[in-house]
Image (cartoon, coloured by chain):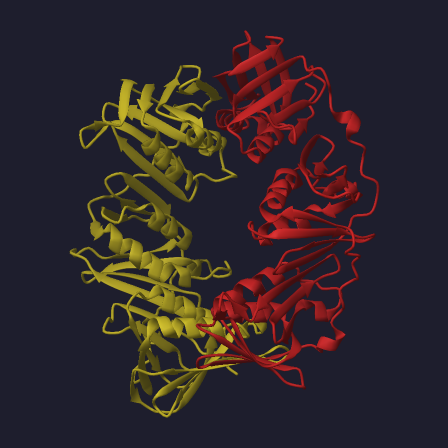
Chain colours: A red, B yellow
Amino acid sequence: MQISIQKDYFKQAVQEVMYAISNKPTIPILSGIKVAVDVNGVTLTGGNSDIVIQRVIPAIVEEEVIVQVYKEGSAVVPGKYFSEIIKKLPGDIFIEADEALHVTVQSKEIITTMNGYDPEEYPALPPMDESSIVIVPGGELVEMVKQTAFASAKAESRPVLSGVHISVQGSELALVATNAQRLALRRTFVETEWESACIVPSKTLLDLAKLLQHSSTVKMAISDNYILFQSESLLLLSRLIEGNYPNIENLFPNEAKSVIASNRKNLLLGVDRASLFASEWRHNTISLAVKNGRQLKISSKSTAVGKIEEVQMIEMLDGEEELEIMLDGRYLLEALKAIKEEKVVLSFHGSIRPVLVQPFGDDKHLHLISPVRS
Amino acid sequence: MQISIQKDYFKQAVQEVMYAISNKPTIPILSGIKVAVDVNGVTLTGGNSDIVIQRVIPAIVEEEVIVQVYKEGSAVVPGKYFSEIIKKLPGDIFIEADEALHVTVQSKEIITTMNGYDPEEYPALPPMDESSIVIVPGGELVEMVKQTAFASAKAESRPVLSGVHISVQGSELALVATNAQRLALRRTFVETEWESACIVPSKTLLDLAKLLQHSSTVKMAISDNYILFQSESLLLLSRLIEGNYPNIENLFPNEAKSVIASNRKNLLLGVDRASLFASEWRHNTISLAVKNGRQLKISSKSTAVGKIEEVQMIEMLDGEEELEIMLDGRYLLEALKAIKEEKVVLSFHGSIRPVLVQPFGDDKHLHLISPVRS
């Protein structure tokens, strides 16, 4: 294998593949990046037992030569050192691997030699059945992940809750995440008659959201043990979380006692301030109170330090004009951050039922937050 | 006490005073910020057993009213909560403290009440003898600190080495820091006949460097137990480290075997790259070798992973044309970062004596780095 390659393209691709490389690999070769070269360009692969990331660097992009291929072949280079040195080299990079698995990396007067692994021993990708796939615009998938994955459980006491439930059914793709105290859901229309569902580790999806080009088109396929996301230059394969995801259908309260609409940004700033004194409690408890059908009072108190309260005007109200509910300020804050729309709708169903938070006029995106018992 | 104050000025000042507030104060009142108000403006004080920071906010700055004083007086507010809420308030801030030590902080429709401490119980500043002082331009003092403090010892096995030695002698102010393997020294002329010396915790000086306005003039005074730095709006008082600082006079080698001049930036990048494979060893050992009096070879190797080497052209050489020395790449890197000049001079005194690193044509700033025995 022998190539020379433009530094900036290569640096970016190497860093992306490094997302999949663990500090403590299950087998030593997985600490390496596989570099495979053919006439079309370079394919980099990095992986661990849970995730595989593959990046393609075409030899030519928009009539510009990115990779000069002198000799096809492949090598497995030590990931950490390789990515560090690629970052620090000043210009175009020459890479050569010999039969003895020595890899030479050169740029100007700088020569590095590394001991590689045998590319023949690098694990093959698990086979994927690509007959049943869904196509989603990259930008939309990234948004859906960012609006749901944060709501999954951090603790691993119930592994299924540490993931995001992805389902395709009735021409709808839905992502759901919950930690049993709050839930985030985001749906979108997809053109398919195929139906499937799985649970994907949140971390995998957040990595995917960082790596996907917004302008790309993403092909998604689900098999028994893996989910595949593939765009023109990126392939990400993740192991699934096994188990039964809780049924969320009956969590949604109907017949709200009161529905209010507010400016999202103002509400977010108010909840952030009120959370100041809430941190004393296990649940970051803040109080939301509707007053006279016109005002929303946001407050918290700490017995030792003090209290904060502020009053905001409600833009619209439908239902009861007086109510109060205690909830975890952090959860409300995160829901308000996930929503991008200017106006937000809060539906109250009594002091012991969840509050529903939605962007105004959009029922494909919602958040549920359980109240805190006072 | 009753004032209203411009948010941006106040936020900045509160954050600066917070540098001195410890998470685990020795007495509870030191978790607070003292807010003292008189007709001239507001003085904020924060402190712990090692350092006190005081910030003055004048009532009027350039004919603009910054503080409206309705009632003089003082209060001690809980530092962490106070600074957090000040950051998050939307506009001008009204502050009132009553006799029962309740502090009300208000901005627009947002009202916070906190339980304060009794300002009468806040510790007084230790008295300073201000008859013997040195005046230094703020920007120069900041630079001197940044060029020396990093070289002090991180471990606390020899407390004096965790500080910076500051001396005033023969119209010269000198800052020295060393961890016994490397040393940084920076001198400047000061107009004084006063002589004194002390050891100041590095952290204090690095805090000072962050807080000082470059355009300010700083008054420095040293007493038995404290050092004082004071500019128009800032006062910083630090406890000294007790003990005898090592005599550094005889550390400086004379009669270099070889002196080279190089481009600082290129050398820095080369040393950074060579350090890649050096991290395997306890000392981050890299090798510097002069070849044919014209080239500098920078290299490192790791038995397990590989090796890196690069060759740079030397701009000037005086002395022996072939030599090699092993040293800690990190120390050389930090010395080269501390120097701002374009060209740097390295003096070699044999493979077991320290290397001297200096900006070209400046003997008031130097770094010594001991070689690593191979």
Q: Position of residue A265 (x, y in %)?
A: 49, 28
Would residue B88 be visible to someone looking at this image?
yes
Q: Where is residue B16 in the image (x, y as percent from the top left)?
A: 37, 40
- Does residue B272 sit above or below A234 in this rendering? below
Residue at 37% x, 33% y is: B11
Q: Residue A90: which quarter of the image?
A: bottom left
Disc count in the image? 0
Residue at 51% x, 60% y is: B155
Q: Residue A365: which quarter of the image?
A: top right
- Does residue B277 sit above or below A339 in this rendering? below
Would residue A328 be visible to someone looking at this image?
no
Q: Quadrant of the N terminus of chain A?
A: bottom right
Q: Where is residue B305 in the image (x, y as percent from the top left)?
A: 62, 77
Q: Image check: A157 left or right of A328?
A: right
Q: Position of residue A327 (x, y in %)?
A: 64, 23
A216 or A117, which is in the foreground? A216
Q: Image check: A202 left or right of B137?
A: right
- Does residue B247 sit above or below A286 in this rendering? below
- Does residue B331 sit above or below A146 in this rendering? below
Q: Quadrant of the C terminus of chain A?
A: top right
Residue at 42% x, 44% y is: B50
A196 or A340, which is in the foreground? A196
Residue at 18% x, 29% y is: B63
